[in-house]
Image (cartoon, helix red, strand yellow):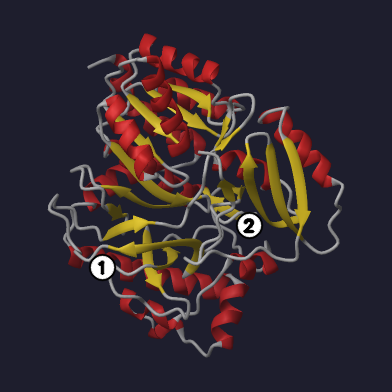
Amino acid sequence: MPIRKLLLNSWFLKAADLLSRQQVMSYHSFFSQAQWWPREKQLSYQSDKLRNLLQVSVKEVSFYRNLYALHGIDVNLIKTVDDLHKLPIISKKDLKACYPDGCTRKTNWPVKEYFTSGSSGNPFATMVDNQTMSQARALMLLRANYSGWKQGDAVFQTGMSLQRGVVKKIKDLVFNTYYASAFDLSDARLDYYLDIIKQKNIKYLMGYPGSMFALANRAREVGLNLDISGVVTWGDNLFEHFRRCIEEQFHCRVTDTYGCGEGIQVAAQCPDGNNKYHIFMPHVIVEIVDDTGMLVPRGQLGNILLTCLEPGAMPLIRYNVGDVGRMCVVETCSCGRGYDILEKIEGRDSDIIHTPGGNKLIVHFFTGIFEYYPQIAKFRVHQSTIDELNIQIVFQPNADENILEDIRKEILEKGDKDLKINFDLLDDIAEGKNGKRRFVISDIR
């Protein structure tokens, strides 16, 4: 066994967890075993965790204590997952109104604040402690395992920022990860990435679907034949033509995954290749409801609610994440895992913006900018011609409109200096017919 894999499968990562006050490897071992539990044991475990979650949340978080009191709810009567529908649904707006004091709690673990725009274009901050993040990171490893990847296998990964910091750089080194920006997807940069993959004989690719598609499409254009073992995608919508191009060009299966920046890893596609999403049941409860909050029949499209079973620093119970999807009509998978199954996540419709200089801006290019401007409540980007972007903006009350010039400058510097950017200030931005507001739209094909 290569020394790197030996280290990763022995004392090294356990020591790293101890030093960073995390439990990633112990949770990875737990989740790796728990996925094979029968459905009855999965549901029993969820119910036990749910009861504890509710007790902690009511005792230590004023938001939930006041909310349930307002609705006359005694959480002692919520016994199983089947009772969850009796609780009110919460939204980003609810949590933002009392953040951070009203909706967070103290834990015995280090806590970090994370910012996310998610797929709704609505900036949001959340507190995540090391216990919750350990579970999320363990499931990140498990979802990569679904592609065939094992700890120590070389990885080419695209992400939001090249400013990795000391801890992440050490992680990249130990995990044999070559990290690249998902925002610079010009032909020259893609050629550089492909050369790294070829020269280093990298067999696994991971990152945003848009960047993986751009990489595969460029390899096809230049006639580069790479024998890749697996591709893992996350973050935005894996369109079917994205999947088709990636799988045909790289001769491997794409494992798409679903999670949210609030510290919850939700699901990953089955390793058997049926493209169904296994829900990580010991970590999260997933509900699909209509606009009135009622559960919809399996196979029917609805709003996705998430309940993270670890209370953490900021409990999320029946949280409307802002995505839409549908549960699989079939409850069990032939692979033998006891997890429930999501048929499809359809709530992250986005397009790639093509620029006059040849760059390609995926959805997270824009969320990576707008999430740091809390004065903006909502935004939508529309491209009708190759050299022009029209950006609709909904400001928070009393916002300073001068920040628009900062945003313009950042888009031009990071995206393409030859873009013309127009801002349109609105009172609100309407959602689409499917209940999801597309916030990056391109008419360029």
Report the label total: 2
Which residue corresponds to the image point at 50% horizontal and 58% vertical from the top-left?
A: 312
Q: Give the labeled residue for mark 2.
A: 122
Which of the two residues, 136 or 430, is positioned nearer the viewer here? 430
Judge from the rendering whether residue 257 lies leftward or rightward of residue 270; answer left or right.
right
Query: Can residue 208 be seen from the camera position used here?
Result: no
Which residue corresponds to the image point at 57% horizontal and 48% vertical from the top-left?
A: 441
- The numbered mark, 1 or 2, whose residue comes first in the sequence reads 1
Circle 1 Cα neighbour tier, 10 Å, few/some/many (<14 / 14–19 / ≥20): many
Q: Is residue 324 above or below residue 227?
A: below
Judge from the rendering whether residue 382 lies leftward or rightward of residue 209; answer left or right.
right
Query: Of all residues shown, which one is farthest toward the top?
Result: 199
Q: Quadrant of residue 343?
A: bottom left
Q: Give the labeled residue for mark 1.
A: 43
Which residue corresponds to the image point at 32% horizontal and 66% vertical from the top-left?
A: 46
Judge from the rendering whether residue 261 lies leftward or rightward of residue 335; answer left or right.
right
Which of the two residues, 157 or 37, is positioned nearer the viewer here? 157
Which residue corresponds to the image point at 54% horizontal and 26% vertical from the top-left?
A: 185
Q: Amino acid at mark 1?
A: Leu
Residue 57 position within the rendered picture, expressed as x and y whole percent measured from the top left: 52, 71
Q: Quadrant of the N terminus?
A: top left
Badge nearest the viewer, 1 or 2: 2
Residue 375 position within the rendered picture, expressed as x and y whole percent measured from the top left: 77, 55
SS for callout 1: helix
Spatial CA distance of label 1 from label 2 is 33 Å
Q: Amino acid at mark 2?
A: Asn
Q: Quadrant of residue 223?
A: top left
Q: Is residue 24 above or below residue 191?
A: below
